[in-house]
Image (cartoon, grey):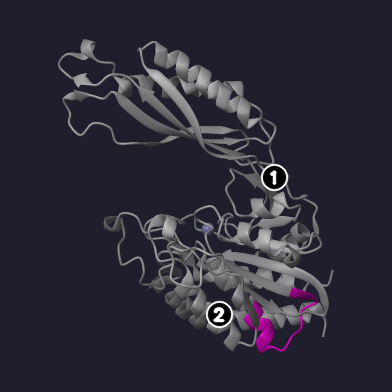
Amino acid sequence: MQTQEKFAQVSERLGQYREEMISLQRELVRRVAVGPDQGGPGEGEKAAFLLNLLTGWGLKVENYPAPDPRVAEGGRPNLVAWLPGQKPEKVWVLSHLDVVPPGDLKLWDSDPYTLRVEGDRLIGRGTEDNHHGILASIMAVKALLDLGLTPPRTIGLALVSDEETGSGKGLDFLLKTQPQLFSPEDLIIVPDAGSPDSTLVEVAEKSILWLRLTLLGKQCHASRPKLGKNTLRASAHVIVALEALHQEFSLENPLFDPPESTFEPTQKEANVSNINTIPGRAVFYLDCRVLPDYDLGLVKDRVEAIGKETAKKFGVSLKVEPVQELKSPPATDPQAPVVKALVKGIRRVYGREARPQGIGGGTVAAFFRQQGLPAVVWMTVTHTAHQPNEFTLLSNLVGDAQVLAHVFLAEE
Ligand SMILES: [Zn+2]
């Protein structure tokens, strides 16, 4: 049978899995997999469900758990399911088991852990991030199994823990303890980000720099401001002064969206609990996404210099500390075989031209790239990850599974 004929069969089969996709979403959504760093029970229950499911389909599934005393016995699961191909070269799809907490429940229209179906929308915590990736990949493999097709390359499905809180117990652990699993000749796809029109194939990331800025002044009664040093007012001026970073680091690179570095003040810690007290301490954070051209040390130095100069005008001291410093790894070559295979699949299924692009950073693919493994991040998103009423579209789930199946069946 010709590849195109096989693909047509698989594609049609995937269209018949809609009900099964919904019921599997429901099973995944109700197994709360918030990691212990965010006060949750971990990924154990969801992993056990998937291990059982995939084994039942006839796949060989391995588990490489990362020890973690905070979760129930067995550590943090990292599953690898195998479908042997005609050759040992592999194609990988890596998805993650963990979800972020629902946040303010009042912002949800229904229980975050009970799947709600509204037309094409599958709503619930984790439906997009990252059950979409899990389901698109496992259903693509199921279609091959049900049709008795052996793919050219061996397929590895990695279902890892701890993506939302640093990957130390997930992909980072897997790469450190089982480096033999992955090879630079493999095609590696991470369905964890993308665009709603399916055309964003992410190959590069900006460096990430998170800074904590602590201002110390003097607390006093609000009726006698001269007796104190108001750190909230000083913070406001520091934040405005830091706008200068955009001019100082103004390079643009069209591979990225947005093309320039970004410097955003984000979190602000609570200060005084009453209105009539001038706060003597203020803490806020700056989230910087910096083009790979720039040295993060230089950015930090400039934040410190600009901040201190401004704070001094208010008699306030300033301390700048890095919370996270992640130099971006080398980009995946936009001409890499995995990019080409994916672009072809997207063209075939969605009829659109996808393009390799860089994003603001923070995807788990960075761990692959640090090891010289050419990974791409792609899926069709609704951009509701981490939000209340998170959802994915069933039609995208079918489409993305078809794209992955197209890659699985590609001969080169
Ligand atoms: Zn994710």
Residue at position x 66%, y 67% in the image: 93
Q: Position of residue 24 (x, y in %)?
A: 48, 78
Residue at position x 68%, y 38% in the image: 254
Q: Position of residue 172 (x, y in %)?
A: 62, 57
Q: Position of residue 248 (x, y in %)?
A: 60, 21
Q: Nearer the viewer, residue 30 or 409?
A: 30
Is disc 2 surrounded by few (<14), some (14 to 19) or many (20+) residues within 10 Å? many
Mark sitting on residue 329: 1
Whole-angstrom CA distance, mark 1 to mark 2, is 32 Å
Question: Where is the N terminus found, in terms of image quarters?
Answer: bottom right
Q: Is residue 47 left or right of residue 94?
A: left
Residue at position x 62%, y 25% in the image: 298
The stretch drawn in magenta includes residue 291: no
Is disc 1 surrounded by few (<14), some (14 to 19) or many (20+) residues within 10 Å? some
Q: Amino acid at mark 2?
A: Leu
Residue designated by label 2: 51
In the orientation shown, which residue stands out farthest toward the front?
69
Q: Amino acid at mark 1?
A: Pro
For residue 232, above or below residue 15: above
Q: Earlier in the sequence, mark 1 or mark 2?
A: 2
Mark sitting on residue 39: none
- Magenta region, residue range: 141-154
Q: Position of residue 194 (x, y in %)?
A: 59, 55
Q: Nearer the viewer, residue 171 or 109?
A: 171
Q: Nearer the viewer, residue 152 or 168?
A: 168
**Quarter assignment of residue 340:** bottom right
Residue at position x 43%, y 15% in the image: 310
Q: Is residue 81 left or right of residue 26?
A: right
Q: Is residue 60 left or right of residue 122?
A: right
User: In terms of secondary structure, where does tag 1 sit?
Assistant: loop
Q: Is residue 353 visible?
A: no
Q: Is residue 263 visible?
A: yes
